[in-house]
Image: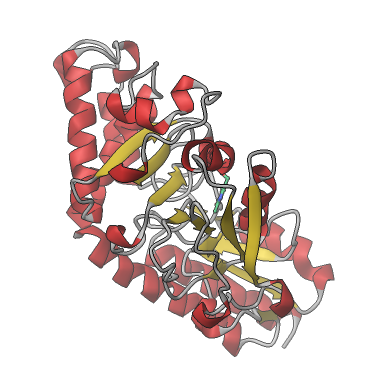
Amino acid sequence: MSSRQYNFCAGPAALPTAVLKRAQEEMLDWQGRGLSVMEISHRHAAYLDMTQDVEAKLRRLMGIPRHYKVLFMQGGATAQFALLPLNLLGAKAGADYLDSGIWSTKAIAAMAPYGKASVVASSQVSGYRRVPSQAELLLNSEAAYVHYCPNETIGGLAFDYVPDTGGVPLVADMSSTILSEPIDVTQFGVIYAGAQKNIGPAGLTLVIIREDLLGNAHQLTPKPFNYALQAANDSMLNTPPTFGWYLVGLVFDWLLEQGGLQAMALQNSAKAEILYRAIDQSKLYSNNIVAANRSKMNVTFSLQNEALDAEFLQQAQANGLLNLKGHRSVGGMRASIYNAVSEAAVHALVAFMIDFETRHWA
Ligand SMILES: *Cc1c(COP(=O)(O)O)cnc(C)c1O
């Protein structure tokens, strides 16, 4: 088999090679114990030490204050779409939702059985080319929370500001943008993210929640999905995804070695700029999202002539550039350039795009 290729998959996405190598080295003999981390009880003192260490590293990376709990859950972001109203509505009748694309739409639909999801602003009117502005948000002061998706993974549309909700807890689906840049956690009531985009392997879901929002769960909430119960049990109410938890710890080590989220933000901005500049300078490729709302994580583009799509993808793959096909619902191309995707990968992609255009269009 060939060596590692440049992988632009939206998720499950590329992981740092150094992390995979370390996992490989430790696979058969974790901490000199003569077994793998997958073969040990989640109640074992060594495993518990590890989980605390992983959480401490995440708190350091993101600057998560003490009055926020970090939950390591399962079920992906999709489960959270329903768990948010189940855990947060309490006596409230509904919550406000911003619509910026496919993932926020799915979150809105999943809310329906539990309460009223008021869509208070939408990118639909702009053809999902820009996010609603702060002035356009007609928020209900009675809402249990305001939900939005800061980075729409499929459309490649990103918020360039954190909505001001006037004191109503802000809930953010950060599945595809978490850890890509420093954020101020205190601006949010809940941050959640499936791991398989920018954190680690699929199977683990992070929930970061302000303590005062705990304790409002509906009585029918299954225990493993009850935020307060999981918080009280250090996310060990039942068996957690033990390998995923271990592996994200290795990713956090790697991020700290890289210089933390400040350093990642610089790299991520540079990578996105290189790619968007190439798109804008070409005649074959285009992206029509307003500049301020272009995602730095998921760069979407389409070819002038769709008939060239298949050839573009096939030749890209032959050149070691994998998984550039856009989401099946929107078509076109998408290059996901998360933390683990190097600037070298982006340069290789741009070189290929220019070469392809020269041969097929110019
Ligand atoms: C991938 C993704 C989801 C869905 O994640 P699952 O883990 O498959 O449930 C939800 N929201 C966003 C923003 C995503 O990128």
- The quadrant where residue 266 appears: bottom left
For image coordinates 57% across by 43% down, the residue present is 81
Q: Is residue 249 left or right of residue 53?
A: right
Count the labels in the image: 0
Question: Depth check: 67 or 239 in front?
Answer: 67
For image coordinates 23% across by 36% down, the residue present is 54
Question: Depth check: 3 or 270 in front?
Answer: 270
Question: Which of the colour schemes (rainbow, by chain, secondary structure, one colour) is used?
Answer: secondary structure
For image coordinates 36% across by 27% down, the residue present is 230
For image coordinates 69% across by 60% down, the residue present is 313
Quadrant of the rendering where the C terminus is positioned: bottom right
**Is 25 above or below relative to 198?**
above
| Image location (x, y in percent) of residue 257 | 18, 52
On the question of residue 234 being in view, the answer is: no
**Is 100 above or below relative to 230?**
below
Q: Is residue 219 left or right of residue 57?
A: right
| Image location (x, y in percent) of residue 292 | 50, 82
Question: Depth check: 261 or 117 in front?
Answer: 117
| Image location (x, y in percent) of residue 185 | 30, 58
Question: Depth check: 54 or 89 in front?
Answer: 89
Instruction: Residue at the far right: name it.
Output: 307
On the question of residue 170 being in view, the answer is: yes
| Image location (x, y in percent) of residue 46 | 17, 18
